[in-house]
Image: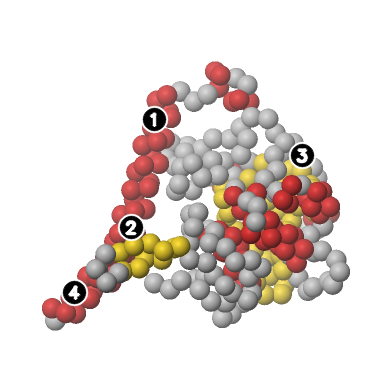
Amino acid sequence: MKDALAAPPSRHASVVLANPPFGVKSSITVVGENGKAGRETISYNRDDFWTTTTDKQLNFVQHIASMLAIPGRAAVVVPDNVLFDGGGGETVRRRLLNQFDVHTLLRLPTGIFYAGGVKANVLFFDKKTARPGQPWTDTLWVYDFRVGQHFTLKQNPLRREHLDDFVDCYLPGEPRSNRVETERFRPFTYAELLERDKVNLDITWLKDPALDDADSQLPPEVIAREIVEDLEAALSEFAAIAEALAGPKAAAAGDAVG
């Protein structure tokens, strides 16, 4: 299995839609002399990266930024830590805002993806011809689809119609100057973003009604059912991974017998 982050992209794309694998660190499996497998944390020292880090999500953001053609557009699913981590995270955010037009952030409800507790977002950015001395990002529009929203993998899954308001606010195909601020959709200028501590893009302004009203909390049977769903989904993911890992070994064993 090839490591997508190991080398710079061999070709460039005008459109990238990506949901990179979630995980805190990048690592590889190493088999020692005793035949036992272990995990080693790795980082990528690439000339096209802005910073060297073991954070898998930050590396995928850098990789996608590097593989975009001019002009190019990207929509990338990222966990919250990409928006607020310091160190390498701040470096990536500063460079991305400066060199790319980072125009939209969609904050998703918790539990949309396979890892039940992961809070995810979709970050939209464009690559354009460089304009020296001037940052490319003018305004980041943030749509908060997290506060007051609740979905599950099976009982109440997220459907296309749930995103109708976001699409209406996004105005696909229209100039972004036509966008209008709403309760869930707000603009933040480049200067405002730089003034935030560590260029933190984890921006929220809506108040979650569940925090004020104890009666609005989910009943225990619903929470229990959702935990079961998340565990079943996780087991399914692990089963798929185990099957994929066993595939090459099974094929090698078959060749040896033959």
Residue at mark 2: 240
C-alpha separation, residue under disc 4 versus residue under disc 1: 43 Å
Residue at mark 3: 182
Q: Secondary structure at mark 4?
A: helix
254, above or below 232, in the image: below
Q: Secondary structure at mark 1?
A: helix
For badge 3, the amino acid type reads Thr
Q: Secondary structure at mark 2?
A: helix
For badge 4, the amino acid type reads Ala
4 vs 1, front mark: 4
Along the horizontal axis of the image, is 219 left or right of 198?
left
C-alpha separation, residue under disc 2 versus residue under disc 3: 42 Å
Task: Choose the circle earlier in sequence order: 1 or 3.
Answer: 3
Task: Choose the circle earlier in sequence order: 1 or 2.
Answer: 1
Question: Label 2 neighbourhood size at 10 Å, few (<14), some (14-19), many (20+)?
Answer: few
For badge 2, the amino acid type reads Ala
The reply to whether discs 4 and 3 touch (Cβ–Cβ < 8 Å) is no
Residue at mark 4: 253
